[in-house]
Image (spheres, rainbow, N blue to C red):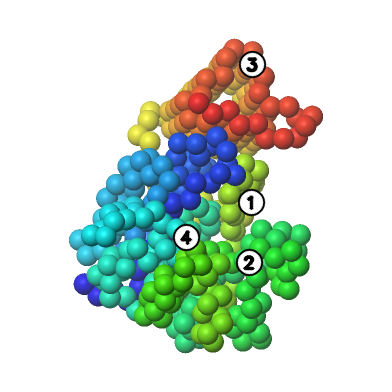
Amino acid sequence: MKKECIAMILAGGQGTRLGMLTKNIAKPALPFGGKYRIIDFTLSNCSNSGIDTVGVLTQYEPLVLNSYIGIGSHWDLDKKSGGVMVLPPYVKENGGNWYRGTADAVYQNLDFVEHYEPEYLLVLSGDHIYKMDYSAMLKHHKEKQADATIAVIRVPSEETYRFGIMNTDEEERIIEFQEKPENAKSDLASMGVYIFNWKKLKKHLIEEDQNPDSSLDFGKNIIPKMLNEGEKLFAYGFQGYWKDVGTVESYWEANMDLIEDDASLDLHERNWIIYSVNPSQPPQYIGPSAKVTESLLNEGCQIFGEVSHSVIFPGVYIGKGAVVKDSVIMANAIIGDHAKIEKSIIAEKAIIQKKEIIGDNKKNDITVVAT
């Protein structure tokens, strides 16, 4: 069952910086944008790019994510030849281990990759918001005759410390990699999107597994090892919207980005649809006393109060006299009459009592209410 290129999505992260939002679910399963989960973007990018074989590497709190992905039909990935498969750690003849690092998650699933005999392996993070044509990146990888290609995006100099930074020559060849540097030499940040020549990557994974000091991580071990051994690594510049929603602040900002009149991330683009699981709820209802402006509303909502500049997920009830502003209200939450919600994230099924006030705009912090 030979495939030219298959994808492995890293979806096992705990997302500790998201606090209570990821207490019981993996970060890629976190609801986003009024109707999606974060992993919808990576799965849809694969489907739209013609990548029809995808392994999803899960570990932390996988139940919701496994159930959500199912057989992959919502992303047109329910193929007889390929499709999407969830890959948690498992026990082998000599025992089993949790995934030690990002590269170890791929290494422990060598049999899955080898089954498809790919020439190229696309490795993706399942917790980023963006739209990207991976087939264009693969074309660039072939043209450069690269051993590995890393997608990069320019970031403000004051934020380089948060990312793996690539230093390149005039031919876009990567000559140095700095992992979250204090003093970065460039502003080209890794997006966590890699294409490897599979045979080369397999060799380095096997060798690195023998290193007792290695955490088998792409950023910490595999990329530096390949550079040190003179492999040809190239950067692939990306210029669209991309957001790492690893913190409460960045998650809230990414949701608010969708509300702009000319949003940088266009969810209405018909030739690059972000697919999702339909909530199958009745039509939304806007009551006679309601006022809704600059907001995203999904199916099943019942709005009787005032909503402005907010993202409202399916099945949310907002009572009479309630005010919701600059906030994200997740599915099936109930906002009582005359409650006031400002710059907050209200988790699924949370109940805000009548006249309760959530969020203090004087501090300008983001308030999170979880169940």
CA distance separating discs 3 and 2:
44 Å
Q: Earlier in the sequence, mark 1 or mark 2?
A: 2
Q: Calculate the distance from the C-alpha at mark 3 to the C-alpha at mark 4.
A: 43 Å
SS category of the residue bearing label 1: loop
* Residue on which the image places disc 3: 356
Q: Residue at x 32, y 63 (%)?
A: 109
Callout 1, which amino acid? Asp
Residue 204 locus on image (x, y percent): 43, 77
Disc 3 + disc 1, Cβ < 8 Å: no
Disc 4, SS: loop
Task: For marks 3 and 1, give the CA distance.
Answer: 34 Å
Q: Earlier in the sequence, mark 4 or mark 2?
A: 4
- Whether pointer 3 and pointer 4 mark residues with C-beta atoms closer than 8 Å, the reply is no
Tag 1 and tag 4, C-beta contact below 8 Å: no
Write the residue at 42% across / 76% down: 207
According to the image, label 1 marks what residue?
Answer: 262
Q: Could you tell me residue 184's position as x and y percent?
A: 73, 69
Residue 303 sits above or below residue 259 on the image: above
Nearer the observer, 349 or 259: 349
Residue 240 sits in quarter: bottom right
Viewed as shown, does residue 201 lie left or right of 172? left
Q: Which labelled disc corresponds to residue 179? A: 2
The residue tagged with tag 2: helix, strand or loop?
A: strand
Q: Which residue is mark 4?
A: 101
Of pointers 1 and 4, the one earlier in the residue sequence: 4
**Nearer-N-terminus badge (3/4):** 4
Residues at marks 1 and 2, CA–CA distance in whole angstroms: 34 Å
